[in-house]
Amino acid sequence: MSKRPQVGNWILRLLVTIVVIMGGGMLLLGLVSGVGEPQRHGLEQALARALDAKATIGTLKEFNIAPQFSVAAENITAQTNKANKQISLGYGRIAFGLLDILTSKRTIEDIELRDLKSDGEIWGPHPVTLSLLKIDDSDLARKPRLTFSGTYGTETMTGWIEMEKEINWSRPSFHFTEQNNMEMHLGNITITGNFKPYGGHGQKIEDAKIIIGKTECSAKTLAIQDLTTEIFLQLIDSKAKETDTKSLCDKLSEAPKE
């Protein structure tokens, strides 16, 4: 499957973008906590650089440095400079342990995104919305999950990826391991497997299983970068056509090209 470098995993790219925003924000704001105009303006500049866009933050609700680095804001918009596409976020909060940031530890203490909307060609050919993305640690009988719900194009989209939990300085933090159980639903399509976030060839879903209506097929590995650019489009187009579905299953079962 061909790859389009400008489009990656939109969830992971969003997380990476926020980390860049925070790192840039720390430098720009001189490690000063607060929710005043200097902090808001500094974060707007960091967001603009991270996305190569013109960015605005309506209301900065929270900005703390220590002991937890946390940012919360409402009514965020970014207009890309090259393609003139827009991303908007109704509310977002993210928090890391300050020591984890300084030591580049891949952990997060909190994330909540509400009412995210992006135009097509930003994170795939179709528009993407997220009504909610957050870490769900409410069920003690199972592992925490990064959960999300929204739409891809006109299709309803929901899913989760398991995370590991640890306690540092009396606060819980969460991280991905080398392989993490996941499940995703797109319309009448279900994708399950082991999410592998680290590796030299990008993020992947290993031991993937795809169910389209009553048809089930397995894929050795799905490259995350291909999901929104090719696989989702093929799945949506073929879900009502049995012959196309069988052909797609055969194609997905082939080993991916490195």
Image (cartoon, grey):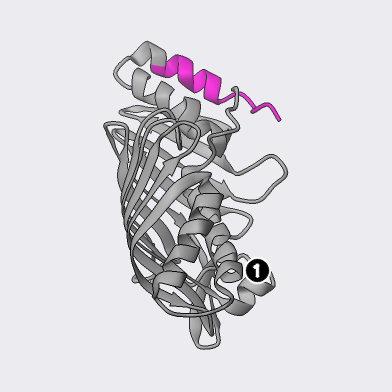
Indicate yes or no whether the magenta region holds residue 200: no
Q: Quadrant of residue 141?
A: bottom left
Could you tell whether 171 is left or right of 4 in the image?
Answer: left
x%, y% of residue 78? Answer: 41, 47
Q: Quadrant of the N terminus?
A: top right
Q: Residue at x 53, y 58 (%)?
A: 46
Q: Is residue 107 visible?
A: no
Q: Which residue is mark 1?
A: 105
x%, y% of residue 251? Answer: 54, 19
Per the rendered image, the range of residues in magenta is: 245-258
Tell me the amino acid under the disc marked 1.
Answer: Lys
Marks counted in the figure total 1
x%, y% of residue 188? Answer: 29, 33
Q: Residue at x 63, y 78 (%)?
A: 99
Indicate yes or no whether the magenta region holds residue 254: yes
Q: Quadrant of residue 41?
A: bottom left
Could you tell whether 134 is left or right of 7 in the image?
Answer: left
Q: Residue at x 49, y 55 (%)?
A: 47
Q: Residue furthest bottom?
A: 170
Q: Residue furthest top?
A: 243
Q: Quadrant of the C terminus?
A: top right
- Give 181 or 214, whichever is nearer the viewer: 181
- Give 230 or 77, whichever is nearer the viewer: 77
For residue 253, above or below residue 133? above
Could you tell whether 181 is left or right of 244 in the image?
Answer: right
Find numbered disc 1 in the image and state the secondary structure of the residue it sits on.
Answer: loop
Q: Quadrant of residue 246?
A: top left
